[in-house]
Amino acid sequence: MKRILLLFTLLASPLTAATLQTDLLIVGGTESGWAAAIQAARMGLKSITVVHDGPWLGGQYTEQGLVCVDESKGTGEVGWGPSWHPMKRSFHRFGLFKELMDRIEAHNTKKYGSPMPGKPMHGPTTFRPAEAEAIFREMLQPYLSSGQVTLKLNHIPVAAMKSEGKVTGMTFRSDKGDTVEVKAALTIDASDWGDVVQLSGTEFEVGPDPKSRYREPHAQKDVSKNPPNEMNPLTWALIVEESESDTPIPAPPHYDERRYLRSTSLGRKEAAKLKWDHPVKVGNNSPWPAKGTESKRQGTILSMRRIVEGTTSSDGITSALICYATGQDYPLERLPRHVCEALEATERGASMKNLVLMSREQRQIVFEDCKAHSLGLLHHLQTTVHDRAPDKTNSLRHYHLSDEFGTADRLPMKPYIRENLRLKALYMMREQDSFMGQSDKSAKETFAMVMYPDGVFAWQFHYDFHDTGRAYLKSEGDSGPWTHYGKPGRDIHYLSERSVFPLRSLIPVKMDGLIGAQGNVGFSSIVSSAVRLHDHRVHIGQAAGALAVLALKHQKQPRDLAWSRTHLEEIQHALCGGTKGTPMLLWPWRDLPADHAAFVAINRLSARGLIPAARDEVDFQSDAPATKEWQNAFLSRCGLDMPVDEKITRGQFAALIWQKLEKVPFQPWVRLKPDDADGDGVPDLNDPKPFGALEPRF
């Protein structure tokens, strides 16, 4: 009888959660989480656990379907900084990003006959998402096999464990309903929506920043004019490939042709007649290349981000990414009535919540409408546009959705996410720190106004908000068709200066045991519009991984390392020259490839502010002769007395200097006041250079 009662008790009791113990927990198998895991493993950490909420690693590259990388990469075909690429960001590739892209391009060459088989207008490198995901797995596999890294897929974060202001782990629920507790000495939040930050109660920001917050030149004085759910829009990417016959998709739910008339020149006249409740620009895109021009780089919807160009590829099949086409973006304010009603049914006021603050179930309601909107564009291209096109040779009616994602609807698992929450960090990067203020792509390039003393990698891109406003027909309101428009104060498009990312922006102001990654880092909404590319996310992850390992090694909190020059040098060493793999670019030299013999020396000296250069001298010219004047200026800056040799190059001279200085003790940062290290009257949290005269300068 006792045995029966005991069995009944066990069966009636809730299942006990499985518990794991790890040194480093990484939440999110995004490109940032993946990079953090590899960096930590390469630095020798023995116990790393990566928990992801989906089946695929790789974030933007894979599960978000953004399979075209924005950069100005040089090739033998076009030289450095190709003129056909509209985005100006001309660093040589570096770090894990370079290793990843090298493997992707090697795969492309083997399978398609070219490292860049798509010949896209935006690019240059494109890739199939499933093939990229396999490469992410391949690069992580050695650390899975060694037991250093444990990977758990399809596990959703449901709760944070905390103790005395410190994150100590997370609880997850699998897609099968099992619960797993992962206890960790440190946690990196590399998730899409800042799951650890939100569940732990760590401070963060969402939505537009008022000018009073960070005094940014383009910030709005009054953000109350924006609904609380206004932010950089989502886009659900479509991957299509050539069919043997016509394969039009059916009209998706809530399809209305008027939404898409502005998507191509073929609907321009009709689009111009529509009366929206906000001014809307009418597009003039061509839908597909004309007959006989297939292999050219051109700005049609099909070829803008084409993955593989079939007439020149060894597989003979064209595939393409459809993303960013006029009419495809999905603004997050003023949601359609049917979406609002579905959200309100879950919770009163849910339709006005910022997407970041919604529950997963509520976000899914928005996601389903976002999917339908993208599918509506494809349906429009395959029907109305096809019917009106005088040249149907390369019509999108001859394309079907790829089945490589393994999803029922043949769409990527997630939308392309441009903006999410922003970690309230030890320093919030501001627009004016790296503000060029010119949209002219021919403007002279310069280093940023502020070169942070704790830079951990170089970055540059356009401050780039897609249309955040949603317009409805005046006659029908939110129950009718809609389109998007650029809102005053948010319609920002200009180039940043050549910048570095500060270590402090990975570290929460208050919460211990936690490091930010992916998009969950310290920057303003405006800066988030620029620091969001594939390479940025990988570099952020690498930096977070290095910070985590060294914090664990010294048994300190990440914030303690941020204020120590000794520990900063350790982190920069781990990222640039001290760990297996391609080193990181710490200083934004335009012309310095990662395989140059003096790469590490030049970067480490630059990060210390020891290399003489004007703000507009963005090329190091490592193989140019080192003039007597330049060497003397260099030596003076370093406080060294050594003979000048005019027969060596600038790179060789930098290497000689680094040999002398690498092991020399440097002056530590000394804090003059508890919250104002350099005593300049600017609190550390608002001071981009909190240690004043000891920091890198020109």
Image: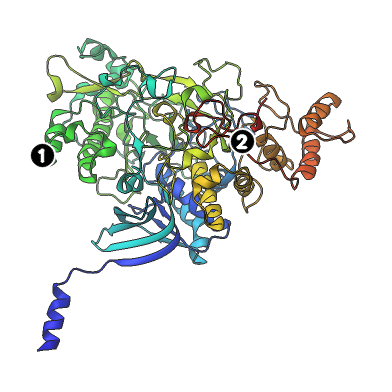
Cα–Cα span, label 2 and label 1: 50 Å
Work out whether residue 84 or residue 249 is closer to the camera in this orientation and state it.
84
- Residue 265 to residue 416: above or below: above
State left or right for residue 497 relative to residue 590.
left
Q: Quadrant of residue 644?
A: top right
Q: Which mark is residue 345?
A: 1
Residue 643 in the image: x percent, y percent?
90, 34
| Residue 92 badge | 2
Q: Is residue 104 visible?
A: no
Judge the density around disc 1: few (<14), some (14-19), many (≥20) Cα neighbours within 10 Å: few
Q: Residue at x 13, y 29 (%)?
A: 337
Question: Which quadrant of the structure image shows residue 630?
Answer: top right
Relative horizontal placement of residue 225, taking residue 419 as reference (left or right):
left
Give residue 660's position: percent from left, percent from top.
Answer: 80, 43
- Which colour style is shown? rainbow
Q: Above or below — where is 388 with respect to 594?
A: above
Which mark is on residue 18? none
| Closer to us: 60 or 106 | 60
Residue at image x 45%, y 32%?
Answer: 428
